[in-house]
Image (tube, grey):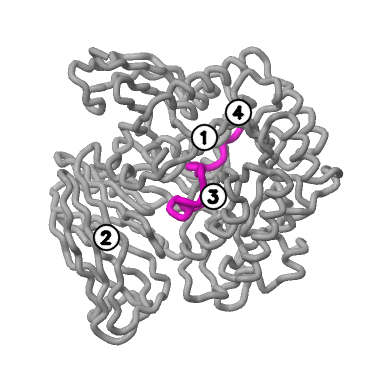
Amino acid sequence: MTRLPGEVLDLDGRRAEHVRIDLAEERHGEDTLWHPELVNEGPEVRASFACPLVLELKTGEPPERIRFLVNGYSSFSGSGSFHLGETEIDSRIPWLRPVHRNLHLPRQRQPGHLTSSLFGVIAIPGEDPLTVGFLPPQDHFAQVRVHPERGAVRLWAQLQFEGQRIPSGAHLKLPSLFVGRGRGALDRYAQRLSREPRPVPAGWCTWYHYYTRIDEAECHRNLDHARRLPWPVQVFQLDDGYQRELGDWLDTNEKFPSGLAALARRVRDAGLVPGLWVAPFIARLGSRLAREHPRWLLRDRRGRRMVALWNPMWGPLSFAYAMDATHPELLEHLRTVFTALREQGFGFFKLDFLYAAALPGAYHDPGLTSLRALREGLRIIREAVGDAYILGCGCPLEAGAGLVDSMRVGNDVTPYWSGLVDRFIGRGFEQLSTRNCIRNTLVRAPFNLRLFHSDPDCLITTGLSPAEQRTLAQVAALSGGTLMISDDLGELDGARRDVLDFAFRLSAEVRAVPRAYSAPDVMEQRLPELQLALGPDDAYLGVYNFGDRPAGRTIRVSDFIPWPGVKDIQTVEIEPHGCRLFHLVRTGT
């Protein structure tokens, strides 16, 4: 491994020769922390990227035998390992790209040119995996990118400067970098991100049974069931479908004639915490917000409104547009909205489509990077809601650190395993499906209780086969994160209740002691089939078959559980989309 000089690129992608990056080295056993400082010895430069660390990894292996772990940009972005003969996977529909892609980055179409957000792991046969990642605090979105060269792999760790000015004579401290070798390096990196998380709640959400069809009467009916559930459900969360229009969050539609405050009061009287879905950084043009304050909408350099997403549940030609999170009037409006919702009694907020605040555009405050813009918006909301619990959704992971309590780590779960939207539009990697939701939960497992509580999305039983129901339940429980359910509570029969009972019981056992969470085979295949919750004296191991045919699995447990005398698991047969669960206890405990 050879370290090459770091570099700063201007807006034309040319290297700024008069800007250098100095690195101070700090060794910690198998790991190295690099502390970069940017020094401009010439005239002011507007930078597109700063790359404090550039590595050349010599190898004689073909690209197809080298794998790179890609962490997607936001909650919804696909994550998994690729070999360097593959190209990045992108949506077939242009207006869905903002949901999954960092639009500040150039689109990569060449095989092996892969980009991972915040951190990356590269595995070359015969060598220990190499983990490279940035450490907070950050003002810029960060990436690790690779591409193969003749006899080598080149790796860049870069910061997204987005045209930020670097004055002549400037000395800028940049975020530190972690570089570690070995199977455990990714976990050691995640440990350095650790924050003290709050107790994780469990709850019920309206979305996956009712979607936008939810109404006041159905809320009341499910609330009557929720108060008598045998599981520790604490939160009763109303999702999309209550608002008069996207952007007008205090105004309910005709389906909620009593208003939000009355619902919150009723939920509290039932002994539960009222929760509410809000998408604070998007609006539709028909909203009062957009009509009365068009200057708050984010626009591109040509003055066109920035499309944040299209959702067919809001209408066949209905686009939602991004808000400019650097506009002080919008920020004060959000403070007013969330203060009012908190005063109405809501104690849990699911904040959705947060990436919209970081889309590229002509910001009201051009001095802010997209990461700072999004974090400033979240900071205002956090101040307004105080100690209420915040679940971030559709958010770049590092943007929510320290501001949200839980973070969605995958796309939405669905009442089917995989569908046409996933297979065709998302090319089997992202877009809505239970399979994709599970993959992201497994890939991002190490960050639970580090950056945030992981939110594996809701546990549902509707539409899934019995094997798929149990698999989804096991993945959610072994994640150690939040556990939300979303079926019609009045329709749960004995078999489906058994699945939920299994999930709540396993979740409690897993979270009873501190654990490290991982997918031990994440560098071997795109969709991992092992899930580990490792404690000091015991471990829970989930084994999966995500294929469409029955399959056998033999697991070399000693490869990833460092206990003396640990035994491998001999061949077990697993049905399609099915799972097995093993509880391993350390000898002598």
Residue 395: x and y in percent read: 51, 52
Residue 10: x and y in percent read: 34, 77
Question: As drawn, is 250 to the left or to the right of 369?
Answer: right
Type of amino acid under label 2: Trp
Mark toward the viewer: 4 or 1: 1
Q: Secondary structure at mark 2?
A: strand
Residue drawn at (30%, 15%) of the image = 585
Q: Is residue 586 above or below residue 286?
A: above
Quarter assignment of residue 521: top left
In this figure, which residue is indicated by the disc labeled 1?
200
Alpha-carbon span between mark 3 and mark 1? 19 Å
How many other residues sit within 10 Å of disc 3, few (<14), some (14-19) or many (≥20)?
A: many
In this figure, which residue is indicated by the disc labeled 4?
460
Q: Secondary structure at mark 4?
A: loop
Q: Secondary structure at mark 3?
A: loop
Type of amino acid under label 3: Gly
Residue 406: x and y in percent read: 51, 42
Alpha-carbon span between mark 2 and mark 3? 26 Å
Give the residues drawn in magenta, as a range: 393-416
In this figure, which residue is indicated by the disc labeled 2?
156
**Residue 394 numbered mark, or none:** 3
Most foreground residue, 431 or 218 = 218
Circles 3, 1 touching at the beta carbon (< 8 Å): no
Q: Earlier in the sequence, mark 3 or mark 4?
A: 3
**Quadrant in which the C terminus is drawn:** top left
Q: Earlier in the sequence, mark 3 or mark 1?
A: 1
Q: Is residue 380 above or below residue 473?
A: below
Alpha-carbon span between mark 4 and mark 2? 40 Å
